[in-house]
Amino acid sequence: MFTQITKGIKVSVQTTFEGTFFKNYKMYYAFGYTITIENQGKDTVQLTARHWDIFDALKEMETIDGEGVIGKKPVIKPGKSHTYSSGCLLASPIGAMRGHYHMVNFASTEEFEVDIPTFKFAAPFAIN
């Protein structure tokens, strides 16, 4: 598990290898990840946007920005958490992701970024 705390917001990531498949005569490696965002602060916050840097050993880095996570903009009260799962397709059996969430503090209206720790993907057969 990969974990990082920024401004009282703890982000934990667990990854899984989902398998391989062919599409348009090319092999892809599917990875899943589950992220838990825990509010360890004293104010209610809302996740409004995300930024991802995706690293694939066989391709250029890809950057993705978007609103919320999996179609939601969760509000997280103090002591509570939000968990979601998603996935990533890579051309290589080895890669990684990192990024940040854009958050808003409801008490102060402050906007801030919460770091998502770099987490690695590796198909079991690619690990030495």
Image (cartoon, helix red, strand yellow):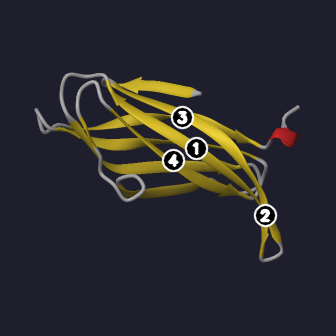
Q: Amino acid at mark 1?
A: Tyr
Sequence-first tag of 4 and 3: 3
Query: Could you tell me which residue is drawn at 56 percent across and 28 percent down?
Result: 2
Q: Quadrant of residue 8?
A: top left
Dots 1, 4 in contact, CB < 8 A: yes
Distance from Cα at disc 2 to Cα at disc 3:
24 Å
Tell me the kind of residue under disc 4. Ser
Q: Residue at x 66, y 58 (%)?
A: 89
Among the two numbered marks 1 and 4 on one chain, the one whose residue lies closer to the N terminus: 1
Tag 3: residue type? Answer: Val
Q: CA distance from mark 4 to mark 3?
A: 10 Å
Image spot of residue 52 (x, y percent): 50, 49
Q: Quadrant of the C terminus?
A: top right
Looking at the image, do the residues carrying marks 1 and 3 touch, with CB atoms under 8 Å apart?
yes
Residue 77 in picture, x, y percent from top left:
23, 32
**Residue 43 position (above or below residue 94):** above
Precedes in sequence: disc 2 or disc 3: 3
Q: Secondary structure at mark 1?
A: strand
Q: Which mark is residue 85?
A: 4
Looking at this view, is 101 or 59 the one in front? 101
Label 1 with label 2: CB-CB less than 8 Å: no
Q: CA distance from mark 1 to mark 2?
A: 18 Å
Q: Is residue 66 above or below residue 31?
A: below
The residue tagged 1 is: 33
Mark earlier in primary sequence (1, 2): 2
**SS of the residue at dot 4?**
strand
Give the numbered dot on residue 16: none
Q: Quadrant of residue 110?
A: top left
Residue located 41% across and 24% down the image: 5
Kindly identify which residue carries mark 3. 13
Which quadrant of the rendered structure holds the N terminus? top right
Q: Which residue is mark 2?
A: 21
